[in-house]
Amino acid sequence: MSARGILFVHAHPDDETVSTGSTLAHYAARPDVHLTVVTCTLGEEGEIRVPHLAQLAADQADQLGGYRYWEYRQATGILGVEDTHFLGGVGRWRDSGMMGLPSNGHPRAFWGADVDDAAADLVAVLRDRRPEVLVTYDPVGFYGHPDHIQAHRVAMRAADLAADPAWRPDLGGAHEVRKIYWTTVPRDVVEAQFAAFAGASDNPFAGAASVDDLPFGSRDDEIHACVTAGPAAADKKREAMAAYATQIAPGDWLDLLGDKLGDGAVAAEHYILVKGEKGPGEGPDDWESDLLG
């Protein structure tokens, strides 16, 4: 029996772990599933949480991208993901930084990439791996980061182009993904996180007067799937997050999430189905538990 494929498109190293790590570990443990993770940049503009590595920063030695590549290799290995791909090749597109920063205008900034140009490489991957399912971000990149928005645009465009037999036949035979999901977090989970970290020194919601000021979070009736990994997969997600030492230091909010809100905050990851037929649902919200359903 040939493996059934799921392909994830993420913006930077650590995004695959933070937002979909339990899902990746869950499916990596299934011998009938082939996982592919496509990452669009090396995360060169990221904040460095380890003082002795501070000189790797973009405004100093500008070596953070290479270091995060090494962290990425460790993390994806922990999760069990064997098939990884950097869009256009390692270092083709650069982390754009947060919206409105000068780094948005860097000649290689992913935010400035021509969408069809960037999508062409993803089309080749889609036509080669031929996954049933594609997972990426929503149109606002979940929280508004330029690279997350661009990853959404490129992924959705590539899905359309890959299915068109007349578009670039040199990139392989046409392939249409059966289902497309966008990552999300339930609104009640966001509210719980907001309350749990209010007043904390590492409050991820600093600057927001209330949860209503946050640009993310979905109502339960807007969500279609929840992959709840078992303890082994959740433990792998924690271990993979720890591998990103430059981004997630001990005591950071992501490190403390499970302690604050319980194992479910790490193990459960939610998705919105935007293409394809919803599979069998479970529980009071009738959510899918299998993206391949």
Image (cartoon, rainbow, N blue to C red):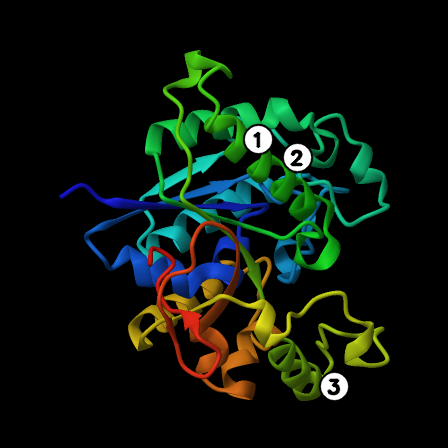
Q: Are marks 1 and 2 in contact (CB under 8 Å)?
A: yes
Q: Which mark is residue 32?
A: none
Residue located at (66% from left, 70% from top): 217
Q: Amino acid at mark 3?
A: Ala
Give how far across and how far down residue 266 sits, in percent: 47, 74
Judging by the rendered image, the residue that carries numbered circle 3 is: 198
Using the image as rendered, state which of residue 66 and residue 159 is in the foreground.
159
Say which quarter of the image contains residue 230. bottom left
Give how far across and how far down residue 24 sits, in percent: 38, 57
Rounded to the nearest angstrom, the CA distance separating label 3 from label 2 is 33 Å
Q: Is residue 194 above or below residue 122?
A: below
Q: Is residue 181 visible?
A: yes
Q: Is residue 185 visible?
A: no
Indicate left or right for 203 with 260 as reference.
Answer: right
Rounded to the nearest angstrom, the CA distance separating label 1 from label 2 is 6 Å
Using the image as rendered, state which of residue 90 and residue 275 is in the foreground.
275
Say which quarter of the image contains residue 172. top left
Q: Is residue 248 above or below residue 144?
A: below
Indicate left or right for 169 with 216 as reference.
Answer: left
Using the image as rendered, state which of residue 140 and residue 90 is in the foreground.
140
> As drawn, which residue projects farthest toward the top?
170
Q: Amino acid at mark 2?
A: Arg
Using the image as rendered, state which of residue 151 and residue 288 is in the foreground.
288
Indicate left or right for 151 with 135 as reference.
Answer: right
Indicate left or right for 93 with 285 as reference.
Answer: right
Judging by the rendered image, the residue that carries numbered circle 1 is: 91
Q: Residues within 10 Å of mark 3 (few under 14, many from 20)?
A: some
SS type, badge 3: loop
Judging by the rendered image, the residue that carries numbered circle 2 is: 94
SS type, badge 2: loop
